[in-house]
Amino acid sequence: MKRILSGIFAASFALSAGAAQAQDKPPLKIGGILDMSSLYADITGPGSETAAKMAVEDFGGEVLGRKIQVLAADHQNKADLSANIARDMLDNQGVEMIYDVAASATALAAGEIAKARNKIIMFNGPGSIRLTNEACGPYTIHYVFDTYGQANVTGLAAVKTGLDSWFFLTADYAFGQDLEKDTSAVVTKTGGKVLGAVRHPLNTSDFSSFLLQAQASKAKVIGLANAGGDTVNAIKQAAEFGITKGGQKVSPLLAFVTDIDSIGLETAQGLLLAEAFYWDLNDDTRAFSKRFTERMKRPPTSAQAGVYSSITHYLKAVKAAGTTDAAAVIKVMKETPINDFFAKNGKIREDGRMIHDMYLFEVKKPSESKGRWDDYKLLATVPGSEAFQSLEQSRCPLVKK
C-alpha cells in the first residue's frame, strides 16, 4: 500500500510540475496592425481581430505548451505609426508574428521592420504588388489579394466584353498607384486604351471634380483604383451625377461585400469585381461565415477570412516545426499546401505570394437578391496560376531565375 501511495504521489507531483512548467512558458503573441477606426475599418479592423481570435480558439488556444495571445493595434492609416507599432511589438512586447497590416503604405513600413528583425509578417488587407516584388523578404507572406491579381481578373474581363477605353480615379498612395499601373498594363495588353487618370487624396469625401474629369474623357470605363470608403463615395457620387446612366461604366478595382452593402444594390447592380473569397460560395464558406456573423453581425470580408486561414496555417506550422523560430516555421508553411474554406491547394511561393483561386463576380440586381448580403453572382473562377503575377515576371530578389 505504501508503494502504491508513493507511486500515486510521484505521478501527481510529476503532473503538477509539468503543468507548472507549462504555465511558466511565456505566451506566444501574435500582433495585428489594423485600421480600427478609419476608411478600411470594415474591411479589416475589429473583424480581423475577431477572425484571429477565432483561429486561435479553434486551434485549441495553445501550441508547444504556450498559451496563444492575440494583440491588435490601430495604425490610423499612418505609415510612420505602423512602423512604430511593429517595432514596439517585436522589440518590447515579445510578438512572434504580425498579421494583416491593412493598407499598402502602412504594410510596406511594417514589413521593413519585420524584415530587419527576421520575423514573419503576413499581409491580408493590403494589396500593393510591391510587397512580393521589391519589398519581398524571406519571412514575408502576401496571403489574400494583390493589385496584379485584381487588375488581371477585373480588367481582362472588362476589355473582353468591349469595355476597352479607361480613365482612372486613383488613390494617391502606393496601393492606388500600383492598382492603376497594373490595370493599365492589362488593358493595353488586351488591346484597350487608357485615356487618362487623376489622383485623389486618401479618404476623400467630395469626388465631384475628379468624376467630371472622368466624364469628360468619354472613356467607356471609369476605373476606381482605390478602396473602402473612397470606393463607396465615388460610386455613390457617380450615380448622383448621372454618369452611369450616361453610358459610362464604373469599375471598382478593389471592392468588398461590405462596400457593396454600403452602396446598396440599386446603385451597385451590374458592377464587375474580383474577390478572393465570398461568404456564399459553398458549404465551407457558409459554415465559417455563419460563426463569424454570430460575433460581428455581418459576414466576413476576404481579408478577414484570410486572417483566419493564414493564422491557422501559421500555428499548424509552429506545431509541426516544434519551434517558433521564423526560419523553421516559414519552411514548413511554404512546404505545406493550404486546404480550408478559404483556399484549395493553396501554396506559398518563394516570393511570399500565396497562390489560390480568384473569382470574378457581378453584383446582383435588387430583384435577384434573396436578402441583405446576397450580393454577388459568380461569373468565373480564375486559377491562381493565371490570376497572379508569374515568378518569371517577379522583381523579388529572392526568386532565382
Image: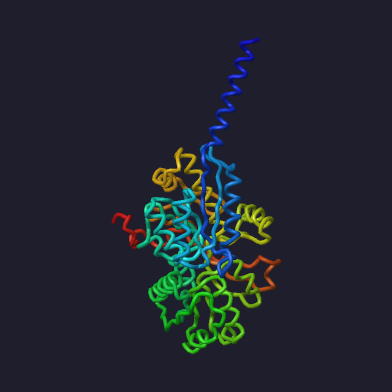
Residue sitting at x 28%, y 56%:
401
Q: What is the basis of the colouring in this image?
A: rainbow
Residue placed most toward the observer, 184 or 381 = 184
Q: Residue furthest bottom?
A: 216
Q: Is residue 166 visible?
A: no
Q: Position of residue 306 (x, y in %)?
A: 53, 56
Residue sitting at x 57%, y 67%:
256
Residue placed most toward the observer, 110 or 286 = 110
- Vertical position of residue 44 compared to residue 263: above or below: above
Residue placed most toward the observer, 122 or 339 = 122
Residue 188, picture quadrant: bottom left
Q: Position of residue 254 (x, y in %)?
A: 52, 69
Q: Position of residue 190 (x, y in %)?
A: 40, 74
- Vertical position of residue 102 compared to residue 284: above or below: below
Taking the image as shown, residue 11 lies to the left or right of residue 119, namely right
Q: Residue furthest front?
A: 92
